[in-house]
Image (cartoon, rainbow, N blue to C red):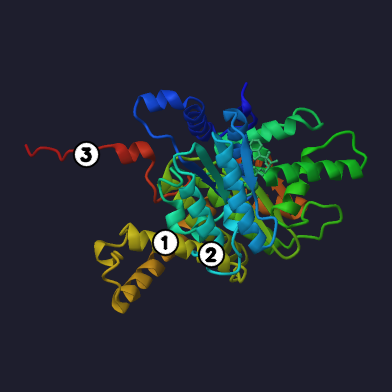
Amino acid sequence: MDAFDKIIGYSKVKGELRQICDSLRNGEVYAGLGVKAPQGLLLYGEPGVGKTLMASALIEECGRPAFICRKDRPDGDFIKAIKETFDRAAEQAPSIVFLDDMDKFANGDEDHPDAEEYVTVQSCIDAVKGREVYVLATANDISVLPRSLRRAGRFDRVIEIEAPHGEDAELITEHFLSGRRFVGEIDPKPIARIMDGRSTAELETVINQAGIYAGYERAEAISMEHFLRACLKIIFEMDAAGPGREAVSYEIALHEAGHAVVHEALCPGCVTLVCADSNKGFTHYYRNTEDYRLWMEARIMGSLAGMAAVEMKTGLQDWGSSSDLDQAFDRVEDLVKNSCVSGFSLHSNGYNDSGQLRARQEQAVSAEVEKYYMRTKQILAANAGFLEALARLVMEKGLLTMEDVSRIRDEAGRAPADTERPAPEEAALPAEKPALAA
Ligand SMILES: Nc1ncnc2c1ncn2[C@@H]1O[C@H](COP(=O)(O)OP(=O)(O)OP(=O)(O)O)[C@@H](O)[C@H]1O
Ligand SMILES: [Mg+2]
């Protein structure tokens, strides 16, 4: 058991931190090989993904005295504080300087690559070079830092910490659920899938809010319903599952059911939540396939499916689809310009960006979207029973989980997913040899 065990998941990052820690603790081994001691590490990423936790674990595990610097005073005083931090670290070397939230050191509302704070940090790093002062920093947005500060030699390693995905999200969810009293055995998987790509800090907040709902109701334990309600409130800013929710219109329910049906038809099990209230809704997905092409097509046709479902079932144009259309057009535009799905002559190559090319690209994008829209309608028509049953359940409950969606899908029976896309085994078969003429 070491300090890195406090970090749940992130095995690759932990591996890197352990390696850095070893080079700081056993400098003589590396010196014997003629290797220079590492200078510094910059961890960057979204808020709440564990950067400070990881930096603290490294400090604890490598056993050097650490001198921490955070922006906690006005500019002039702060510059003095930066210098003092480095001076003290140099006096007590081997040591660590920890610059937490370094991107907040300079005034946030200006373009400030030459801000005095960064110039000071840079000159301090250079001043302690060769004196066994390791510099550790965290930041949300490294684009505001001067490039010279980020360069190798000042920070040898720059590691992006992403919000937890897949197995990491499951491990972290399991960890945070284990400390709470939940009704029965709560399966962390559906929760992890809803929270996939969200920061650990958000997950902690949602689980805590679920506990607050349970406490307010004087419930014996936290239930999945409490969790979902907290999740909707905090992550998706909706009250759809709350007591006294307003009725959901058939049109909104159909729109969301359309998104869900097409995604499920193409990537079964990828829909994690379907939610609607009196004037809006959303459907949430989890990427559950490695097949990039399949996932992209699911996202493109899934975006178009809300509009298509409303049009097919009510004969009305759906006016609530503009952001869905934006998403579909953006994805198709990328395929046309960068993957040449409509021919090489439409490739955006950076030096041929004429108005004429752009006009042809726009035409091709619209034509591709039209084709996808037709396929979307075919998928919905083939899954008409699933669509209707799902829309009715959205109206009744306002919020459907993964289990609800899978149950309705299985009850309605699986229809052929997509007539245009060959089954994988079919696609892999070589073309039949022409029969030899007698
Ligand atoms: N992998 C993890 N394992 C266990 N706890 C984690 C993990 N990642 C984050 N946490 C917890 O989530 C919370 C937020 O983490 P932390 O403060 O380290 O995030 P941060 O990336 O430094 O955020 P900010 O950019 O806002 O400073 C803390 O309570 C932390 O212990
Ligand atoms: Mg932090």
Q: Say which residue label 3 marks.
A: 432
Q: Earlier in the sequence, mark 1 or mark 2?
A: 2
Q: Which amino acid type is marked by label 3?
A: Glu
Q: Earlier in the sequence, mark 2 or mark 3?
A: 2
Q: Which amino acid type is marked by label 2?
A: Ala
Q: Which mark is residue 193?
A: none
Q: Please state which of residues 369 and 6 is positioned toward the viewer in this rendering.
A: 6
Q: Is residue 100 visible?
A: no
Q: Say which residue label 1 marks.
A: 332
Residue 132 appears at what percent x and percent y? Answer: 49, 36
Q: Is residue 362 left or right of residue 233?
A: left
Label 3 residue SS: loop
Cα separation between marks 1 and 2: 41 Å
Q: Please state which of residues 194 and 435 is positioned toward the viewer in this rendering.
A: 194
Q: Residues within 10 Å of mark 2 (few under 14, many from 20)?
A: some
Q: Earlier in the sequence, mark 3 or mark 1?
A: 1
Question: Residue at point 74% right, 57% down?
Answer: 238
Q: Is residue 91 left or right of residue 209?
A: left
Q: Is residue 291 left or right of residue 140?
A: left
Quadrant position of the C terminus in the picture: top left
Residue 111 appears at what percent x and percent y? Answer: 53, 68
Mark 1 or 2, closer to the camera: 2
Question: Residue at point 67% right, 59% down?
Answer: 77
Q: Which amino acid type is marked by label 1?
A: Val
Mark 3 or 1, closer to the camera: 1
Q: Which mark is residue 115?
A: 2
Label 1 residue SS: helix
Label 2 residue SS: loop
